[in-house]
Amino acid sequence: MGIFEDVLLNARAAVDTVGQKAGKVIDISKLRLAAADLKSEITQKYQVLGRLTFEEETTGKIYEENKKEIVENIKELKSHLESVNDLIASAKQKTKCDNCGSYNTRGALFCSKCGEKLHIAENEEDHMSPDDVIDFTEDNFEDDDLL
């Protein structure tokens, strides 16, 4: 019975792990859909802005207030889109370059697009405890330790 119980426990652990990974994939998919919706809405706002600008040029009517409102809406939507893209990058374990805004593999030292040195966030750094540090002073070595 011991082997059967071990197999059952391992199977349960595997199912839990697969379930967590599937949940993560679903979350990323939802975020991608939200990003696509935001991009579509931004495109629609640009089209309306273009039509208003065209109307101003061809008819002489002034739509300045409408255009300002649409520009503010576009800025807000772009801000939301950037937040969603940051969430997607975080879920995919990517790091954003401060210089050019491209996403890089977490742990990379330099941006793959612009070459700028990437800043490592606190939670990404490998911290060493004092116990991990080896003291290389002469007092800690004997002649037998040398090759």
Image (tube, rainbow, N blue to C red):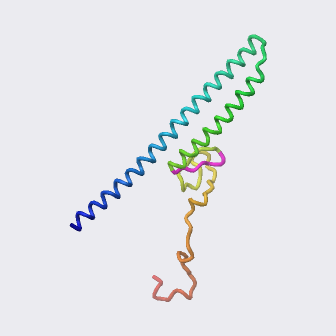
Q: Residue at x 55, y 54 (%)?
A: 108
Q: Residue at x 53, y 86 (%)?
A: 140
Task: Decide: is 17 above or below 40.
Answer: below
The front one of 93 and 38 is 38
Query: Residue 147, located in which quarter of the rendered image?
Result: bottom left
Outermost residue toward the left?
A: 1
Q: Residue at x 58, y 41 (%)?
A: 84
Q: Which residues are magenta?
A: 93-99
Question: Where is residue 111 drawn, in percent x and y?
Answer: 59, 49
Task: Decide: is 30 above or below 54.
Answer: below
Q: How many circles with numbers are drawn on the protein?
A: 0
Q: Residue at x 64, y 44 (%)?
A: 100
Question: Where is residue 21 drawn, in percent x and y?
Answer: 42, 50
Magenta segment includes 39: no
The front one of 97 and 70 is 70
In the picture provided, is 91 more to the left or to the right than 10?
right
Question: Where is residue 99 drawn, in percent x and y?
Answer: 66, 47
Question: Where is residue 66 drawn, in percent x and y?
Answer: 74, 23
Q: Can you say which quadrant of the picture contains the N terminus?
A: bottom left
